[in-house]
Amino acid sequence: MWVMNNMSNIKLKNSIWSLVIISALVWFILAWFSGLNLSDAKVFFKLVPNVVSLDLLIITVFTKWLWKYDCFRGWLVPFPNLNGSWIGHIFSGWEDPETGQGVPPIPVMLTINQSFLHISCMMHTGEMKSYSMSEGFNIDKDRQIKQVSYIYTSKPRIVVDNRSLPHDGAIVFDIIEVQEKKLTGRYWTERKTTGEIELVFHTKKILEEIPESIGTHPLNPPRKIIAKSGKFVPKKHNQIKN
């Protein structure tokens, strides 16, 4: 889902005009190489199937690959290309009710899979994965707003379900592209917790695991193996909401 604003109407006009111009050029080129006279109505409409087919091919190529090029940014493509893996930290506002102490920064990775018509986000920490369910851009150059936001569902690892339950939430990121590509934002959860997230662009590849170089979850529970069952038993902690 894309967040619509006034700017999207301008891009729609540009898209329509671009398609009209491309169609006219295709019509002319086909008639030129075929030696046809476009002033003849029958000849004109005879080329319609060919023009439509080429238009669809151009649209497919554009929405799959060409939209990523900077030359289309701004006047035809209003949003940035965020494809790839982003790494950084979560700064949770949660505090231990017994000690009053907060949570150290939590290493995190966000992977974004984006096309011209769709975007999906997956966030990884050492204890959970979260998946976006509804996503969108909020781009308004006049108001200096450049954001991507999404609603997500979080699925913690089974070994921490005694203190971290599945939940839903929302994230809003400000997109920074000058000097260094960054995503900085805040989140809210249905568990009434909030926090901030700071990410930097890491690679164009969609990674499946968090790079070891950014560290491990600060509250990753120590585990011991019961020889007979072979099961991991986590050490109990107060429920931590991040």
Image (cartoon, helix red, strand yellow):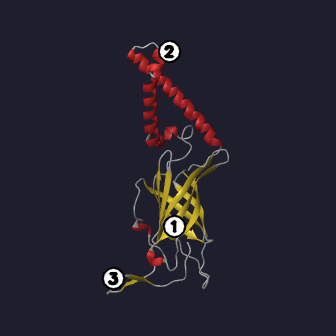
Q: Which of pointers 1 and 2 lies earlier in the amino acid sequence? A: 2
**Residue at image x 56%, y 69%?**
91
**Residue at image x 44%, y 78%?**
159
Q: Nearer the viewer, residue 157 or 173?
A: 157
Gap between marks 3 and 2 measured at Cα: 79 Å
**x, y percent for residue 76:** 55, 38
Callout 2, which amino acid?
Answer: Ala
Could you tell whether 120 is left or right of 9 in the image?
left
Callout 1, which amino acid?
Answer: Ser
- The answer to which image quadrant residue 84 occupies is bottom left
Q: Nearer the viewer, residue 144 or 5?
A: 5
The 10 Å Cα crowd at callout 1, few under 14, some 14 to 19, many 20 or more, is: many
**Residue at image x 48%, y 41%?**
67
The 10 Å Cα crowd at callout 2, few under 14, some 14 to 19, many 20 or more, is: few
**x, y percent for residue 164:** 52, 75
Quick check: 222 above or below 82? below
Name the mark nearer the viewer: 3 or 2. Answer: 2
Q: Secondary structure at mark 2?
A: helix
Q: Secondary structure at mark 1?
A: strand
Could you tell whether 235 is left or right of 95 in the image?
left
State yes or no: discs 1 and 3 in contact (Cβ < 8 Å).
no
Q: Which dot marks residue 154?
A: 1
Callout 3, which amino acid?
Answer: Gly
Q: Which residue in the protein does label 3 denote?
A: 230
Q: Which residue in the protein does label 2 denote?
A: 41
Q: Nearer the viewer, residue 204 or 225?
A: 225
**Residue at image x 56%, y 30%?**
17
Gap between marks 1 and 3 measured at Cα: 27 Å
- Say which quadrant the C terminus sits in: bottom right
Q: Which of pointers 1 and 3 lies earlier in the amino acid sequence? A: 1
The 10 Å Cα crowd at callout 3, few under 14, some 14 to 19, many 20 or more, is: few
